[in-house]
Amino acid sequence: MKQLVKYFLKRVLLYFLIFVISLSAFFFFINLVPGDPVTRYVQQLEQRYGISTPLTEEIVRKYKEAFGLDKDLFTRYILYIRRLVFEFDFGPSFVAFPKPAYSLIVDALPWSIGLLGTAVLTSWILGIFIGTVIGWKRESKVSNFVLICGLVASQIPSYLLALILVMVFSFGLGLFPMGGAYSAALKPGFSFSFISSLIYHAFLPSMSLILIYVFGVMISQRALVINLLGEDFLKLAEAKGLDKKRLIKRYILRNTLLPQATGLAMSLGFIVNGFFLIEWIFNYPGIGRLFMMAIREMDYNVLMGITVTTMFCVLTANLIIEFLYPLIDPRIRRG
Amino acid sequence: MKEPLIEIRDLRVYFRTIYGDARSTDGVSLKIFENEVFGIAGESGCGKSTLVEGVLRLMKPPGYIKSGEVIYKGKNLFELTEEEFNKIRWKEIAYIPQGSMNSLNPVLKVEEQMIDAILSHTDTSKEEAKQIALEALDSVGLPEDVINMYPHELSGGMRQRVCIAMSTCLKPKIIFGDEPVTALDVVMQKLNLQTIMHLKEKIGLTVVMVAHDMAWHAEVCDRMAIMYAGKVVETGPVEEIFLNPLHPYTEGLLNAVPSLKRKFAKSIPGIAPSPLNWPPGCRFHPRCYRKMNICENEEPELKLIDSERYVACHLYNGGNWK
Amino acid sequence: MKALKNSPKFLTGLIIITCLIVLALMEPYINDYRLKGHSPTEIGLYDIFLEPSWEHPLGTDSYGRDVLALLLNGLKYSLFIGFTAGGLATIIAVFLASLAGYKGGKIEAFITVLSNSILIIPSWPILAIIVLFVKKIDLFTLSVILAFFSWAGPSRQIKPQISSLKARPYVDLARVNNFSDLEIMFKEILPNFLPYILVGFSVAVTGSIMAETALRIVGLGPGDIPSLGQVINWAIYSGAMAIGQYLVILIPITFLILIFVSLNLINVGMDEILNPKLKQITGM
Amino acid sequence: MSEKLLDLREVTKIFYKSGIFEKRSVKAVDKVSFDVLSEPEVVALVGESGCGKTTICRLILGLETLTSGEIIYRGESITKWLKENPKEYRKEVQIIFQDPYETFNPFYRADRLLEVSIKKFNLVKNQNEIKKMIFESLEAVGLRPKEILGRYPHQLSGGERQRFMLARIYLIKPRLLVADEPVSMLDASLRAMFLDHLKEFKRLGISSLYITHDLNTANYIADRIIIIYAGKLIERGFTEDVINNPLHPYTKDLISSIPVPDPKNRWKEKIEIGKVKLSERINQSGCYYYNRCRYRMSKCETNFPPEFDVDGRKVSCFLYE
């Protein structure tokens, strides 16, 4: 028990450290780039719309004050962290001023988490399943064919697949909607038509992730299974005459679960990277699309907020996965 | 003549490699009788472990059984379906793996690993199965709490004993041990080997033990076979083999290792051949000090010399070996 | 090395990537000949939206540019950025991995945490913001920024190898043979380490090109460097999807996928040779 | 009495493993003292795997640094040797490793190893002489140079590879050879050949420290035997004495457990199943062998016995107080 508590504490501490360090590094880097966001934002506005008033400088000054940009870097850092920790506040949004950035993010976040979570879990489970099968029957031609497909498919970036899918199925064949999370004619609620519309809209975006990640997991699962098949304890399990179901479930799957969970944790960040573009391509109202919109408007606080939020979410997801390790592997649990 | 409990006929276990088939076990025939301790000796790469894996159908690709029969109770084990064979496995023919770190599943408790074998083969309830497991652990001298432990919490010697307990808990007819006591310290090796022998007496087991070190055979076996280059070169009662080795290889092997009593050792010249390319004729001829012309071309057959001794060597062709 | 010849995966990968590199290297000559000295990105050189023909095998785009010329040009830039950024990332990775392997202890633990953090954290949005906020961004700056974010992958591949190579008995034997540290590094460790560096390099190249393409597709980064991502961006914004001009998008995507797949095949092939255990088991 | 070639004094090695938040330590070698004389002799260091014997050999070679204690070679500490005159020390103290495969750099041909050794220790200068030397050394260990030269390590068999290592010793002719389980990976039929070379080395004036887990082979070649258990030296003395009249309970158990290759003379003493409570865990507070010891006394549990002199032999056991 002491072992377990120690393990949990260490993990939490480690993730907290990672979060704080990357957040700080990120903050200082962005703020050390010459020029401040407000000036640049105004410059951009001037360029885009050709407006130039004598009042510009005054406006910039006022904005800077409102955003706290007139203070020195360190104070700004302290203020930012304080606001973040105590008020969960990222500051106001430029574009939707005075709406706070955080409310935009909070609106978008559930969509992303919902879509991403479903897609990742589906592909993870499916990948483990297929990988186990082709690893177990590695001699068969079908397995080899699937493996070769996987070697190719797993290397396609998800956002490129998203482009292909939207092009073929939405624009070309017109089978799926070109964007959005649900049909505009429907009111959100627990109705059948709404939910089916949700699934219908989420199908292509999630597919562009699943179709790729399944193969990634499959390939690693196959390698794990093949490595396990050479283990002595598996030989003993076979000699025991166990039925196949028990053998695969308790002797193969159980033992691949830990490395697969680690793999999931390690690839989460990478998946999220691609997911930003997927949402943008499918115009899905999640955090990725918000991010792209903010990029176009150079909406500084929203960008900061999104980055910090995704960082936090991914790290939390990782922490949760690592909390599951002791359940999977007794060696962590009992020393 | 006595009926063998299990008979291996011309078993060949090969491995596919990019250079062609590696003929690890290449035509082995053996008879093992009830209630005996049968030893299989030979150096690394002679095919003794693949022989056992072949008999128990534990081969993994690229290894495969090229040909041969294993007759047990009048049935050829290789002709049974996977399910039929699974019923015999463990219940009648059990296996003790090498005493390595990995012989138990690291993520399951000892209890679960012992019980799942019992449940797969009998109609007992979980409680009864646990009772059987506890008795088995007791019979190998392990305390009860071991059942709630994970393999990594046990020492190497204890893990080995768990394996022994596991393989004997269904009271099988015959146990194949593949180097059952290596990788432990000598004291533990002795203890565990004696445990196996104790159980043999208690349950009435037949034990087939593979070991590279001839001294272990000398301690416990009744009869033994010496393998070289995928083939059996000599079989017979242990005492006779040690006193009067017939095959030059057996003789060399016995002289190669010094012991505490005998400060004398002599190597066999040359090097062990590769299973990809066994030498023609008698496979031992390039290293044999009694090589004759015939040995280079003609492969000697395993022939009955005495009432119980077989040897595959051209020296004993006429039966006038004495 | 001989074993590499027997690996169909490695060979296929090598052939594809070589073809792509040759194509990219020949781009100036091909385009110079085909466009008669005009730049591939020059606007209004031809009529817009020409159907594929002998003269314009892939047609022209909404700005009247030859699509084939754009593609080859884009391929050149994408590969260039990928190889520069990948190279830099590999250097960082090798340096940090060696440092970790050599010093061990806390330093090793710290470097491991650092590289894992970069892998765990979704780094692309950070990258995007940096690219957005850095004012003047040229080819080299972009490569450096990309490299900074893509060294963690190769580092994860390389580090365990360094630790294991360092502990090999032949290194001990070299020391007993009175080799100096430098001699051990260059004569004993490096030759066996090179294949792993190559694996790390291709991981880094893939990572850099993936990140760069994603940036360019959404319109970030230096507009005057028309890499494949930029070509896709132009196609999307000119409405190529809506009017059914699929090739303009599909072909750059195919090029990119070919790069990624071929680099991965090289890696898988090398992996099977470097870890004979896996090969032995698969028997392939 | 002959002078000491190598003298280990209270040698201790602790390994540290550190992560971000923690530091763990393992005591691999615990205050081990023994010596090897310069009048050629073979000293066998016997112990089970994981008892620290390989660490001792790495410490002697300077491949690990000492945590505490001293290793003296010809009157000077080896730290000093390696700092001031590493070349001479390396030439005089050589090693044969356990794994004959891994001792070769797979990148190079096998014979490079011999060539490098010649060059590094300036044995001869001229290219022709180098060739001649390599030929002679290979022939000395029973390899046919024409067949062997130019091959890569993976093209050689285990026996051939380990002979290469022997050839290297013939070339360098050190004063002290440390052999770390040199035969454990060799086929039984080849072991005697290897051990006979160690005997030959002794005739050539080379003292050896032979590290093994196998008392049979130690008995075959060693003049003196040192027994270690869990990083601690527990008994040392002349081979005949240790084998025929072991003092420490662990040595006794060890010797009585070794199987005898004589079916007419099997183990007489059987260990009763069920009576032996087996706890292999090492007792950390006192004598390490306490939990397994048949003669244990109450004071053994908390005190580690010092080394006692018994008829000119040393043993760490309170039985001989």
Image (cartoon, rainbow, N blue to C red):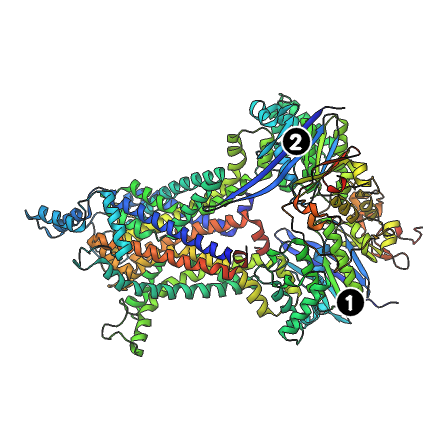
Q: Nearer the viewer, mark 1 or mark 2?
A: 2
User: Left or right: where does residue B316 sit relative to residue C124?
Assistant: right
Q: Say what amino acid the circle numbered 1 marks.
A: Ile
Residue A334: image quadrant is bottom right
Does residue D82 appear in the picture of this structure? yes
Query: Is residue A244 positioned above or below D5 on the image?
Result: below
In this view, the residue farthest toward the top is D125
Q: Secondary structure at mark 1?
A: helix
| Location of residue D245 in the rendering, given as x and y in whole percent from the top left corner | 81, 40
- Number of numbered discs on residues: 2
Residue D269's x, y, as percent? 82, 53
Name the spot of residue B209 as percent of width and height, x first. 76, 57
Of D64 and B236, the residue lying toward us = D64
**Residue at the bottom extreme, as displayed:** A192
Q: Position of residue D110 (x, y in %)?
A: 63, 35
Density class for disc 2 (Cα within 10 Å; few <14, some 14-19, many ≥20) is many
Q: CA distance from mark 1 to mark 2?
A: 53 Å
**Which chain contains the residue that carries disc 2?**
D
Residue A195 vs residue D143, the one in the foreground = A195
Residue type marked 2: Leu
Which numbered tag is attached to residue A180?
A: none
- What residue sits right under mark 1 in the picture? B203
* The N terminus of chain D - image quarter: top right
Q: Which residue is label 2 attached to? A: D8
Question: Could you tell me if the residues under marks 1 and 2 are in contact, i.e. CB atoms within 8 Å?
Answer: no
